[in-house]
Amino acid sequence: MRIIAKSKQILAFMVFILILSFTVNSLVAKQQFTTENILDGIITPGEYSNSQNIDEGKFILYWKATSQNSIIFAMEVKTTGWIAIGIDPIYRMKDADMYFGWVSTNGSVHMIDAFSTDDYGPHPPDTELGGTNNIIAFDGTESDQTTIVEFERGIVTNDTKYDNPIPLTGEIIILWAYGTSDDFEAQHAIINRGTIHWSLKGASILRYDFSQPFILGLAFFITLSGLLIYVDSLGRPSKKENGNKNGEQ
């Protein structure tokens, strides 16, 4: 009986430790959620888990997914003019979900959620077409003839007509372009635009998932239950012993 009582105490202690671990992990995950999406227009080493060099390194596209079902893009481009990407056009530029950013000479940062209505534009802001601006946050900097713009948008937005959803699997076309002035409606040189095949796969999705702790906890309880059954069996007489005792009586 003492062995069984001791085992129950161990079980209660293990349950307490498991609950405490879940609580601490949840608090850590919530802290990550509140700090992971700070946009400052500066790209630090390790900030983005994914990047792609374009146009011989003159245009670098960075990205990462977040735990809030959004994606953060960063564009680092060798220009002091506007920079842009277009998401998933049907043909050439038609129906591309476009994002233009630039930094004015006074340091103010501008960002436009736009949509290309034809093969070669125009690409007015979504709000002029009856849609909505779905840029969650943005910031940028300009120095050494380089412009950096970071922005966040939902992987899927509520503007189903002028924002293209970003698939979690497979590849889509991304348009890239940049100009030499801050006028994003100005014609840009052909050498400053192009397309790439792009995939969200491999992005850093910072989501706290209970599946792993659940599996570990389940394995722990199964193991502990087996141990308790074994310990309990040690204190019980076998059937043979019971038979002998009954025969003796």
Image (cartoon, rainbow, N blue to C red):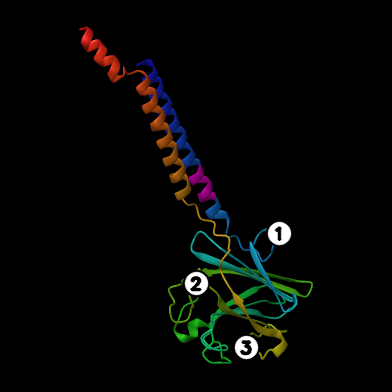
**Residue 32, position as x, y percentages in the image:** 55, 52
Residue 204 visible in this rendered orientation of the protein: yes
Determine which quarter of the picture holds residue 65. Answer: bottom right
Which disc is residue 45 wearing?
1
* In-image side of 247 versus 26 (left or right): left
**Quarter occupied by the C terminus:** top left
Give the amino acid at mark 2. Answer: Pro
Q: Please give the name of the residue rendered at 79% of the width and 72% of the height, measured from the top-left corner.
A: 144
Q: Residues within 10 Å of mark 3 (few under 14, many from 20)?
A: some
For label 2, the SS is loop
Q: Which residue is mark 2?
A: 167
Q: Which residues are magenta?
A: 25-31
For label 3, the SS is loop
Rounded to the nearest angstrom, the CA distance separating label 1 from label 3 is 33 Å
- Which residue is most to the top? 249
Q: Main secondary structure of the magenta part?
A: helix
Q: Which residue is mark 3?
A: 185
Q: Please give the name of the residue rendered at 54% of the width and 49% of the height, measured from the top-left corner.
A: 31
